[in-house]
């Protein structure tokens, strides 16, 4: 399917699928927090339904991206990349959906995670 496209590199497919996956997961994990009228069981049910598309995107992202399946990334690199993408998606969600502003300390901490991505990818193809 996507992996056979000679014009789109696997790393880009992996990143795009992880962005989509993390968007669903961020909604599944945090959207219910701002829904004060939702009972806990409704929040749990809605979150589970939102999480299913997350897995539909996350599983192929990790398979296509991993070296065992022809991708460019090791498992630690996939995990660190996923965490960095999560922080980016979460920041956008926090500002646009939850209407909260990250503190400077939050942004510094996120920057340190991005530095970890650079460290993980340094010296590896």
Image: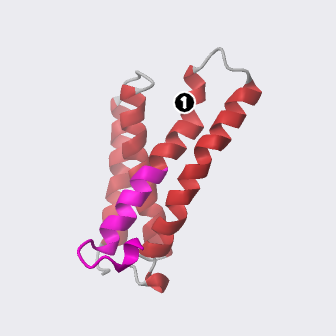
Q: How is the image coloured?
A: secondary structure
Tell me the quarter of the image containing the N terminus.
bottom left
Whether 41 is among the magenta residues is no
Query: What is the secondary structure assignment of the residue under circle 1?
Result: helix
The magenta-colored residue range is: 1-21
Whether 17 is among the magenta residues is yes
Determine crowd level at label 1: few under 14, some 14-19, many 20+ residues with C-alpha closer than 10 A.
Answer: some
Identify the residue at image location x=59%, y=42%: 50
As drawn, is 45 to the left or to the right of 16? right
> 19 above or below 48?
below
Q: Horizontal and vertical percent for residue 76?
A: 48, 71
Q: Given the current orientation, which residue lies at the most extreme top position?
A: 37
Q: Is residue 102 in sight in this rendering?
A: no
Identify the residue at image location x=49%, y=85%: 68
Q: Is residue 80 in sight in this rendering?
A: yes
Q: Given the current orientation, which residue lies at the most extreme front position?
A: 1
Tell me the quarter of the image containing the C terminus.
bottom left
> 22 above or below 99?
below
Residue, disc 1: 31
Q: Horizontal and vertical percent for residue 31?
A: 54, 30
State the predominant SS element of the stretch in magenta: helix
Q: Horizontal and vertical percent for residue 11?
A: 33, 70
Identify the residue at image location x=54%, y=52%: 54
Q: Horizontal and vertical percent for residue 57?
A: 50, 58
């Amino acid at each position: 399917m996507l992996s056979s496209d000679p014009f789109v590199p696997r790393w880009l497919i992996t990143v795009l699928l992880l962005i989509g996956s993390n968007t669903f997961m961020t909604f599944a994990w945090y959207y219910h927090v701002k829904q004060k009228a939702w009972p806990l069981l409704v929040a749990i049910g809605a979150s589970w339904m939102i999480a299913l598309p997350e897995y539909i995107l996350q599983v192929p992202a990790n398979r296509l991206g991993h070296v065992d399946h022809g991708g460019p990334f090791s498992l630690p690199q996939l995990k660190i990349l996923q965490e960095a993408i999560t922080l980016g998606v979460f920041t956008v969600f926090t500002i646009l959906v939850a209407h909260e502003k990250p503190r400077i300390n939050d942004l510094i901490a996120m920057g340190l995670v991005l530095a970890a991505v650079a460290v993980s990818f340094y010296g590896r193809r």
